[in-house]
Amino acid sequence: QLQLVESGGGLVQPGGSLRLSCAASGFTLDYTIGWFRQAPGKEREGVSFINANDGNTYYADSVKGRFTISRDNAKNTVYLQMNSLKPEDTAVYYCAAVLSSVSGLPKWEWFDYWGQGTQVTVSS
């Protein structure tokens, strides 16, 4: 059973940076793992993912060039480095995983394992 625990959220000014972490106990490279976010009144959207096995990465268009996903296999931890943050990045960010490969930016309905979420607020 995979367990995901996020950390690293907080309040940051526009243009600032944050790094989210997702500690994944029981994780193997057979899982696709990454981040969704949900802002108040909006649907949950995919942000960035690392595909199972081949390690390909996917990003939402809205975060390309600003966010970077990475994985430390020794620590079973996935990171989301978020730079040049904007107010529209404000949301609860969730780490999620599924025991399969994906093609392109996946949908939240495909994922079986979820963390508790961490709040990211970008405001001056």
Image (cartoon, rainbow, N blue to C red):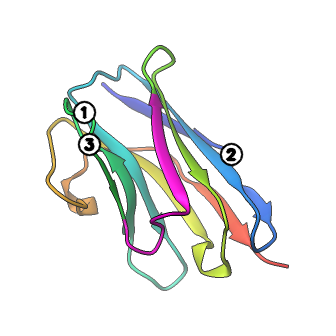
Whether residue 9 can be seen here = no
Q: Which mark is residue 31?
A: 1
Q: Secondary structure at mark 1?
A: loop
Within the image, what quadrant is residue 88 found in?
bottom right
Residues in magenta? 60-71
Closest to the camera, between mark 1 and mark 3, is: 3
Image position of 30 with respect to 55: above or below:
above
Q: Secondary structure at mark 3?
A: loop
Quarter of the figure that contains the C terminus: bottom right
Q: Nearer the viewer, residue 79 or 113?
A: 79
Q: x, y (%) of residue 52?
A: 22, 35
Q: Which mark is residue 8?
A: 2
Q: How many marks?
A: 3
Residue at (53%, 76%) from the top-left corner? 39
Lower sequence index among marks 2 and 3: 2
Q: Which mark is residue 13?
A: none
Label 1, label 2: how many angstroms apart (C-alpha)? 22 Å
